[in-house]
Image (cartoon, grey):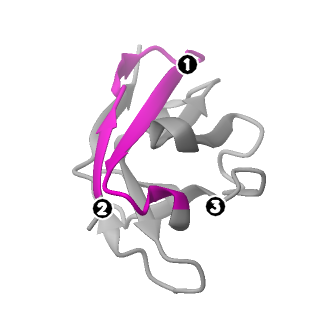
């Protein structure tokens, strides 16, 4: 079983930066694909970014490409989302998630961390 815990959310002004962390417990972190999703008020949850087992291959949503970077540190069982040039539209609850390679659905989810971008 994998437990995921996000941290690093908060309030930031437009144009600012934040780094989210996702700490994982359990022994299989190194064997699961991990990613970030977000859900804004009144909207469906959407994919933000994902990183493979090696940490070398990433996929980033077009809406955040060039502004957000995803990475993972296997030794620390932690995944990161570096967010820069934040905009009001980035306001959402951000969730980290994990799935086994080859599976379609993410089976493991954190509780979420709020990110608010406003002046």
Q: Which residue is mark 1?
A: 17
- Expressed as whole percent of the image width and height from the top left, the position of residue 6 reads 32, 40
Residue drawn 60% across and 17% down?
15
Q: Which residue is mark 3?
A: 53
The answer to whether residue 15 is above or below residue 51 is: above
Residue 11 part of the magenta-drawn span? yes
- Expressed as whole percent of the image width and height from the top left, the position of residue 49 reads 60, 54
Which mark is nearer the camera, 1 or 3? Answer: 3
Element type where label 2 sits in the image:
loop
Task: For residue 33, say whether it is visible.
Answer: no
- Expressed as whole percent of the image width and height from the top left, the position of residue 65 reads 74, 46
* Image-quadrant location for residue 117: top left
- Give the camera-side residue of 86 and 59: 59
Residue drawn 36% across and 25% down?
8
Q: Which residue is mark 2?
A: 2
Alpha-carbon span between mark 1 and mark 2: 28 Å
Please tell me which of labels 1 and 3 falls first in the chain. 1
Mark 3 closeness class: few <14, some 14–19, many ≥20 residues within 10 Å: some
Query: Would residue 72 appear left or right of 79 to someone viewing this image?
Result: right
Which mark is nearer the camera, 1 or 2? Answer: 2
Query: Would residue 93 appear left or right of 111 to someone viewing this image?
Result: right
Residue 109 part of the magenta-drawn span? no
Residue drawn 70% across and 56% down?
54
The answer to whether residue 109 is above or below residue 69 is: below
Q: Are marks 3 and 2 in contact (CB under 8 Å)?
A: no
Q: Which residues are magenta?
A: 3-30
Residue drawn 65% across and 37% down?
68
- Give the camera-side residue of 97 and 39: 97
């Amino acid at each position: 079983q994998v437990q995921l815990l996000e941290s690093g959310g908060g309030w930031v002004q437009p144009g600012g930066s934040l780094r989210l962390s996702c700490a994982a417990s359990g022994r299989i972190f190194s064997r699961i694909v991990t990613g970030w999703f977000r859900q804004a008020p009144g909207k469906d949850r959407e994919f933000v970014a994902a990183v493979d087992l090696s940490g070398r291959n990433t996929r980033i949503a077009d809406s955040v490409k060039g502004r957000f970077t995803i990475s993972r540190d296997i030794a620390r069982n932690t995944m990161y989302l570096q967010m820069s040039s934040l905009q009001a539209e980035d306001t959402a609850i951000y969730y980290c998630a994990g799935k086994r390679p080859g599976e379609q659905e993410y089976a493991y989810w954190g509780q979420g961390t709020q990110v608010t971008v406003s002046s």
